[in-house]
Image (cartoon, helix red, strand yellow):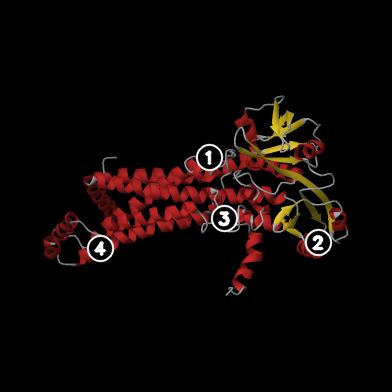
């Protein structure tokens, strides 16, 4: 065993010296390789953690949200609608939700205005999300005016700023009292944006959804399970523009690595010829090249993954955040909770280490099994 | 540490140790984030929230699950979806479930 280890160490010695002789080329390969693993690992770590966090925090979303549609568009819930739902068996609790969007022409940003059901906010006061605090420089006690769609200016006092730690769900919220909301948007009395409802028996949610569609054909129930499913498929790999762009990079790297690993340079061929001429066995030459491919790809995988982890969980995915922000002016700044999927890491390992190692071995095996004289002559 | 193999293996071991450290860090951070996550869960329940604030640029990306099938084409019937975040996100699961089979089953018009 010791002899075997000693032999492998000698082979690694040889490989390391040979890589050091081609320093620029080897370092270049390692850097490009590491970068590729970094990008792939960043995207997969980020989406996995986000998916996980979304499923976790949205578990408390209303069991059913009922919208009313007119000509395929979301419309207000008229008076009397809630009473009709009350007659559907299995429904335990019903609440009208009041919320809407406001475009702030000062910042060119969209806010979500909302009336909380479980919390009383005095008239003339608002509670704002942390992104508003940041971008409009608001703090507790400050006044802020919004121009309503009617053209009137409405002034509110900020009574509280929502916690920064929950920015993933509250960044752009503006909470206000019901009278303020109705006055501001000239919202007709008795109308609601949509309805949140809870079902007594969790097994019955789907049935209640069906009953609701039958009783109110113009309605569209959105079940909690569907909300969770939507977020479970968030940034679906198939849909990601970023990954589509990345595929070009992966392909480019594939060509680069193949060219580097599979096409032996004349110098390398000569090296193999000499090694064989001085008595190296075919197995030794292959083992030496195996170590080269394996060590380079393993190092690239480890370094790329570690940098990606730091980038995603300690620097808030800063490099790729602009892609995600799109044209949005307000965006949340949140630190995701690290949740690593072992299978995902293993897949990344297999796909980054194995192909390169294999690509190095094939041509070497071909060169190493031929006669040294032929190899040296090219 | 004079042999090249020592240096290479040493460096690889260091990288492997850093790799292992990310898992330890993840466990520690998960524990540290737990109370904040619980408060966020409570906030979602209290305010009856249904969506994450990921993209505030368009209503169908801000409230992804509340979007209807036509909201991405809101300007006119054949308008192209033009918000960048729309190309990152798949349509809500609910819409795909109900409309996809219909699209497949519907006969093309003459």
Point out the frontmost of discs 3 and 4: 3
Depth check, front residue: A56 or A251? A251
The answer as to whether the residues below labels 3 and 4 share one chain is: no
User: Mark 2: few, some, or many residues within 10 Å (few <14, many ≥20)?
Assistant: some
- Estimate the spatial distance between the alpha carbons at disc 1 and disc 3, rounded to whole Å: 34 Å
Is the Cβ of the residue at disc 4 closer than 8 Å to that at disc 2? no
Point out the frontmost of discs 4 and 2: 2
Can you tell which quarter of the image residue A71 is in?
bottom right
The answer as to whether the residues below labels 1 and 3 share one chain is: no
Q: How far across and down, in percent of the image, does residue A320 sit?
A: 48, 44
Q: How far across and down, in percent of the image, does residue A367 sit?
A: 20, 64
Mark number, residue B79: 3
Point out the frontmost of discs 4 and 1: 1
Q: How far across and down, in percent of the image, does residue B4 sit?
A: 27, 44
Residue hosting label 1: A316
Residue hosting label 2: A216
- The chain to which mark 4 is attached is A
Residue hosting label 4: A363
Earlier in the chain: of badge 4 and badge 1, it is 1
| Local secondary structure at mark 1 | loop
| Local secondary structure at mark 2 | loop
The answer to whether residue A323 of the structure is visible from this angle is yes
User: Mark 3: few, some, or many residues within 10 Å (few <14, many ≥20)?
Assistant: few
**Residue under the point 63% across and 59% down:** B93
- Estimate the spatial distance between the alpha carbons at disc 4 and disc 2, rounded to whole Å: 69 Å
């Amino acid at each position: 065993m010791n002899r075997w280890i000693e032999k492998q160490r000698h082979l690694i010695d040889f490989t390391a010296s040979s890589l050091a002789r081609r320093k620029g080329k080897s370092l270049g390969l390692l850097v490009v390789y590491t970068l590729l693993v970094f990008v792939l690992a960043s995207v997969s770590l980020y989406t996995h953690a986000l998916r996980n966090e979304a499923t976790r925090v949205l578990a408390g979303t209303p069991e059913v949200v009922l919208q009313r549609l007119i000509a395929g568009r979301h419309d207000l819930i008229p008076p009397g609608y809630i009473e009709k739902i009350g007659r559907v068996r299995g429904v335990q609790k019903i609440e009208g939700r009041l919320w809407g969007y406001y475009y702030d022409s000062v910042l060119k940003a969209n806010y979500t205005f909302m009336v909380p059901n479980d919390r009383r906010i005095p008239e003339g006061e608002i509670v704002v999300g942390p992104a508003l605090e940041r971008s409009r420089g608001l703090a507790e006690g400050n006044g802020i005016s919004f121009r309503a769609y009617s053209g009137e200016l409405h002034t509110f006092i900020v009574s509280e700023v929502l916690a920064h730690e929950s920015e993933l769900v509250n960044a752009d919220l503006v909470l206000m009292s019901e009278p303020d909301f109705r006055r501001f948007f000239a919202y007709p009395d008795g109308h609601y944006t949509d309805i949140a409802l809870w079902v007594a028996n969790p097994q019955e949610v789907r049935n209640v959804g069906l009953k609701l569609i039958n009783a109110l054909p113009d309605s569209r129930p959105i079940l909690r399970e569907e909300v969770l499913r939507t977020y479970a498929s968030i940034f679906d790999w198939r849909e990601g523009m970023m990954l589509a762009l990345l595929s070009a990079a992966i392909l480019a790297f594939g060509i680069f690595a193949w060219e580097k690993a599979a096409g032996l340079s004349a110098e390398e061929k000569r090296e193999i010829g000499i090694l064989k001429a001085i008595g190296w066995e075919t197995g030794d030459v292959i083992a030496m090249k195996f170590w080269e491919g394996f060590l380079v790809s393993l190092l690239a995988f480890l370094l790329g993954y570690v940098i990606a982890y730091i980038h995603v969980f300690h620097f808030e995915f800063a490099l790729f955040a602009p892609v995600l922000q799109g044209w949005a002016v307000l965006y949340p700044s949140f630190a995701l909770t690290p949740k690593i999927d072992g299978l995902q890491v293993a897949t990344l390992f297999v796909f980054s280490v194995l192909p390169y190692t294999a690509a190095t071995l094939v041509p070497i095996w071909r060169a190493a099994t031929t006669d040294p004289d032929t190899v040296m002559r090219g | 540490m004079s042999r090249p193999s020592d240096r290479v293996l040493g460096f690889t071991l260091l990288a492997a140790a850093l790799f292992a450290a990310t898992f330890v860090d993840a466990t520690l951070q998960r524990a540290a984030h737990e109370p904040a996550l619980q408060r966020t869960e409570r906030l979602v329940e209290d305010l009856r929230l249904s969506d994450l604030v990921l993209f505030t640029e368009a209503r169908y990306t801000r409230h992804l699950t509340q979007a209807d099938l036509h909201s991405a084409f809101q300007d006119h019937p054949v308008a192209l979806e033009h918000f960048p975040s729309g190309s990152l996100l798949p349509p809500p699961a609910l819409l795909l479930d109900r409309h996809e089979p219909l699209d497949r089953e519907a006969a093309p018009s003459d």
